[in-house]
Image (spheres, rainbow, N blue to C red):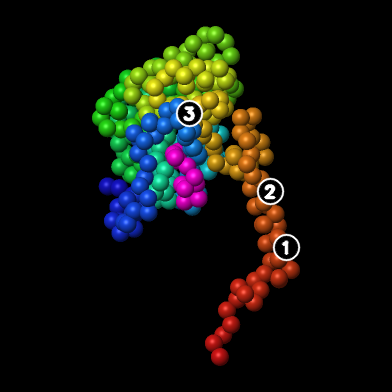
Amino acid sequence: MSTTYTIDTATSRATPTPAPMKRLTIPAIRARKGREPLVMLTAYTVRMAQLLDPHCDLLLVGDSLGQVIYGLPSTIPVTLEMMAAHGAAVVRGSYHAVVVIDMPFGSYETSPEVAFESAAYLLKETGAAAVKLEGGAAMAPTVRFLVERGIPVMGHIGLTPQAVNILGGYGARGRTQAEATKILDDARAIDQAGAFGIVIEGVVEPIAVEATRTIDCPTIGIGASAQCDGQVLVIDDMLGMFDRTPRFVKRFDDLAGRISAAVQTYADEVRSRAFPGPEQTYAPKD
Ligand code: KIV
């Protein structure tokens, strides 16, 4: 029984009536290969989804929410239930972008059947259109299994954060010939398995360019190349919510600084009794 997602035919943001605009579709995203770059950002909450939706083609409910929202040390402890709750919020807050939900570590690796159950749960609970999973050639049979059963899949290769314990850190991949060859093989395998797009994360630029040139589905770069078919960033990173950001992140704002300044002003006004003022208090009726 769904607890996080209910269709209200009068007001649902997933299928609002009347529809303010048509939600983008997976075939429309696929058709953007080699055309206008795809704009993708992560979103985890309803209000942020509302703000990002008009500007984005894709919203990713990334398992980066483990660190960004929950303060966890990595994405590994993230659960299906966490993804479902935030996924439902993002769908409720959007009606234009395609919403993609990350499959968390441990929810899809053991077999294609387990992956199908997890992906079906996420789509039913949230109303999202697609899932994303990490991994290269080894995950290709799973990608094919899901796609053939009606679940659109976005791949994620190169630096795959769920494999941090194998990789030994979050450094860029593909610096040796062997690694470069493996990443390109992974891109081809996931593409041929039917993924509608592939995130290429943290790789040396020529690999991202070569993968983009040689596979059929759009590539979405993060720490990859401007030549990819689209770009994705973690929203809190690009808004400047953290003191330290990885090299590949451009800070488009200093939201942490601006929040801090606003809260300092609030604290000063509370302490000086300047807030609340007459505009924020209720006068008795005459
Ligand atoms: O979890 C996430 O936010 C991601 C993006 C960084 C691609 O996978």
> Along the horizontal axis of the image, is 37 left or right of 6?
right
The answer to whether residue 2 is visible is yes
Query: Is residue 57 rendered magenta in the image?
Result: yes
- Residue farthest to the front? 35
- Residue wearing tag 2: 257
**Quick one: label 2 or label 3, which is nearer the N terminus?**
3
**Between marks 1 and 3, how big is the CA–CA gap?**
48 Å
- Residue wearing tag 1: 268
Residue at left offset 53%, top offset 43%: 69
In this view, 33 is above or below 268: above
- x, y (%) of residue 219? 46, 26
Q: Amino acid at mark 3?
A: Asp
Tell me where the magenta segment starts and ends, as one range.
49-60
Query: Is residue 50 rendered magenta in the image?
Result: yes
Residue 24, by quadrant, is top left
Which SS class for mark 3? loop
Which SS class for mark 2? helix
Residue at left offset 40%, top offset 17%: 188
- Residue wearing tag 3: 229
> Along the horizontal axis of the image, is 104 left or right of 145?
right
**Between marks 2 and 1, how big is the CA–CA gap?**
16 Å
Q: Label 3: how many residues lie within 10 Å, few (<14), some (14-19) or many (20+)?
A: many
Q: Amino acid at mark 1?
A: Asp
Q: Closer to the camera: disc 2 or disc 1?
A: 2
